[in-house]
Image: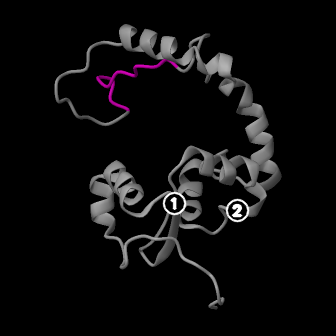
């Protein structure tokens, strides 16, 4: 259905090559913002994708006006929910609000201020990464620099 007066944000004119996007995702996103502005739109794998490239716009969408937007039946929903379950990233509505309230204390300004020390302590305690070493995440040679179970970790239960 086409609505008269509906505007599509600026962006690439044709479909985006997912291989190009996956080869440098940060470059892709920053390139869109640099070329097309604060809100962009493009097509990828037959889906329409909108991106907000400023923190105040993200806050508007994700916090201040969350009721106006949905994750349901989006490509991310179909891809992430089977992998991650119905967590904060994939949930919506009342379930999202409940989960957000539960994790909010870990992201208070006073807690976030201590993140740098936690990360630095974890990095210092971790064994040195072998140069150019690549291996599976579960491999015992793969050090985990942040101990999420540490009493000082914001991710503790």
Q: Quadrant of residue 133?
A: top left
Q: What quarter of the picture does the C terminus occupy?
A: top right
Q: Is residue 84 above or below residue 49?
A: above
Q: What quarter of the picture does the N terminus occupy?
A: bottom right
Q: How is the image coloured?
A: one colour
Residue beneath disc 2: 69
Q: Where residue 36 sits: x, y (%)?
A: 41, 64
Distance of label 2 from label 1 (alpha carbons): 13 Å
Magenta segment, which residues? 138-147
136 left or right, relative to 59: left
Q: Where residue 22 sits: x, y (%)?
A: 32, 57
Q: Where residue 9 sits: x, y (%)?
A: 52, 71
Look at the image and say whether residue 139 sits in the magenta stretch: yes
Q: Considering the numbered disc 1 on the image, is that residue within a helix, a strand or a loop? A: strand
Q: Considering the numbered disc 2 on the image, is that residue within a helix, a strand or a loop? A: loop
Q: Residue at x 37, y 8 (%)?
A: 124
Chief secondary structure of the magenta portion: loop
Q: Is residue 103 above or below residue 29?
A: above
The answer to whether residue 45 is seen in the rendering is yes
Look at the image and say whether residue 25 sits in the magenta stretch: no
* Mark 2 vs mark 1: in front: 1
Q: Earlier in the sequence, mark 2 or mark 1?
A: 1
The numbered dot on residue 51 is 1
Q: Quadrant of residue 99?
A: top right
Q: Residues within 10 Å of mark 2 (few under 14, many from 20)?
A: few
């Amino acid at each position: 259905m086409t609505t008269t007066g509906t505007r599509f944000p600026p962006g690439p004119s044709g479909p985006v090559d997912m291989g190009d996007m996956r080869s440098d995702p940060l470059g892709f996103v920053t390139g869109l913002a640099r070329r097309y502005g604060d809100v962009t739109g493009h097509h990828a794998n037959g889906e329409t994708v909108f991106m907000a490239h400023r923190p105040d716009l993200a806050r508007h969408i994700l916090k201040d006006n969350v009721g106006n937007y949905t994750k349901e039946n989006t490509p991310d929903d179909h891809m992430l929910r089977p992998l991650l379950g119905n967590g904060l990233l994939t949930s919506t509505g009342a379930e999202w609000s409940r989960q957000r309230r539960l994790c909010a204390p870990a992201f208070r300004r006073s807690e976030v201020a201590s993140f740098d020390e936690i990360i630095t302590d974890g990095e210092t305690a971790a064994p040195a990464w072998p140069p150019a070493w690549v291996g599976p995440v579960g491999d015992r040679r793969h050090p985990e620099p942040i101990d999420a179970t540490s009493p000082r970790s914001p991710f503790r239960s």
